[in-house]
Amino acid sequence: MVAGMLTDHLVNAGADSTLCSIPTRRELVKEAARNPTTTELKESQNTQQEYYWTTCPLSQRPLATPIVSDSSGKLYNKDAVLEFLLPAGDGTPGRIRSDNEEVLEGRVKSIRDVVEVKFEVVKETSSVRKGGNMKVEKWVCPVARKELGPGVKAVYLVPCGHAFSDAAVKEISAEACLQCNTPFTSDHIIPILPTASADIAKLAVRIKNLKENGFTHSLKKAPGPSKKRKKIIDGRTETTDGATPMAESDTNKTAPKPTIPQPSSSSTAAGASIKNAATASLTAKVLKDEKERNKKRRLGMNDNLKSLFSSGESGTRKDGDFMTRGYSIPADAKR
């Protein structure tokens, strides 16, 4: 009987402890609303940094040369960016393209919006991924010989694209690239995968100023608007951008056409295939000069050639032709 009572007591105690260990709804909501600690934030940030330093967010493949970066400092495989910029075909799923647009956030509209980052590769290591073992490149700073990756602040220069550690660039304070001697300014030192809010804000201001001045991230001219095209409708000239149309007769009055010398009749056939009037006129003039030179050349033949032909102005004229009048037999030679 005592043993039975002891068993019931232990069962009841176990049930009470189980009930006490189940969290209530109030505790669950409070746990979810709790801000992450500094340690948790650092671990999450390190995980993201390791992913973006080794994987292209567009193709989900390991980063491998050639590698490009946009104005935010993110890294991509160049072939993935080129594939994204190609027109969408039947073989490109819409979901994948929309996901890539969400990743790029409108920063890449053409190849001018990216810069090829030139890392110094020291070795390749194998990494186990979903698709199997894949090679991952390891990069170092060419100056400090420090490995570039998660936990190391790295930068690259625009427009050349060479990558260094941030400490090496600040310590040397050069105005030209240490690898190729290309000049640069401090505004064009791009942090790679920045995490500090100050660096992210600085990059946003930089690309905004470049766009206002008509430049892209690579410091190349941004593609301009299409040229205005004119079309004539019922004798009136209209522009495609909606400008005020102007009658063709008014255009002729306000802007008289310049007079262009017309080619001569002898050179019309030679210049018929030339659409440019100035070029046709020049061709006709050259042909005319060549014709005059040929004429003078024929008139200026030497005397040996002239002697073969009879001249109407000659004072003495002999009977017979050149075969009978050119030679006579001497009298003393006759027998």
Image (tube, rainbow, N blue to C red):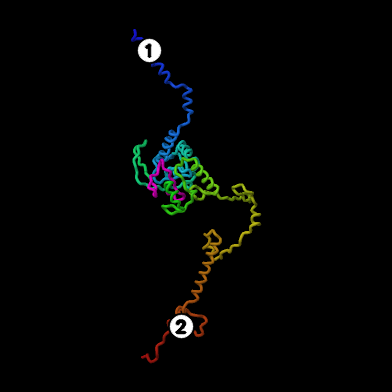
In the rendered image, is residue 143 in sight?
yes
Q: Quadrant of the N terminus?
A: top left
- Nearest the camera: 230 or 153? 153
**Label 1 or label 2, whichever comes before in sequence order:** 1
Query: x and y percent of residue 132 in the render?
Result: 34, 37
Identify which residue is drawn at 40% across, 90% down: 330
Reading the image, the residue beneath label 2 is 320
**Residue 145: which disc?**
none
Give the overall secondary structure of the magenta segment: loop
Residue 39 shown left or right of residue 269 in the figure: left
Q: Judging from the image, what secondary structure is the residue with disc 1 in?
A: helix
In the rendered image, is residue 225 in sight?
no
Query: x and y percent of residue 180 in the render?
Result: 42, 53
Q: Is residue 264 above or below residue 236?
A: below
Residue 66 shown left or right of residue 256 in the figure: left
**Label 1 amino acid?**
His
Q: Which residues are magenta?
A: 140-162
Query: x and y percent of residue 61 in the render?
Result: 39, 40
The image shows a total of numbered marks equal to 2
Q: Is residue 325 above or below residue 102?
A: below
**Label 2 amino acid?**
Gly
Q: Is residue 73 within the magenta segment?
A: no
Q: Judging from the image, what secondary structure is the residue with disc 2 in?
A: loop
Please tell me how crowded label 1 is: few (under 14), some (14-19), or many (20+) other residues with Cα within 10 Å: few
Reading the image, the residue beneath label 1 is 9
Please tell me how crowded label 2 is: few (under 14), some (14-19), or many (20+) other residues with Cα within 10 Å: few
Query: x and y percent of residue 82 in the render?
Result: 44, 44
- Nearest the camera: 278 or 148? 148
Q: CA distance from mark 1 to mark 2?
A: 164 Å
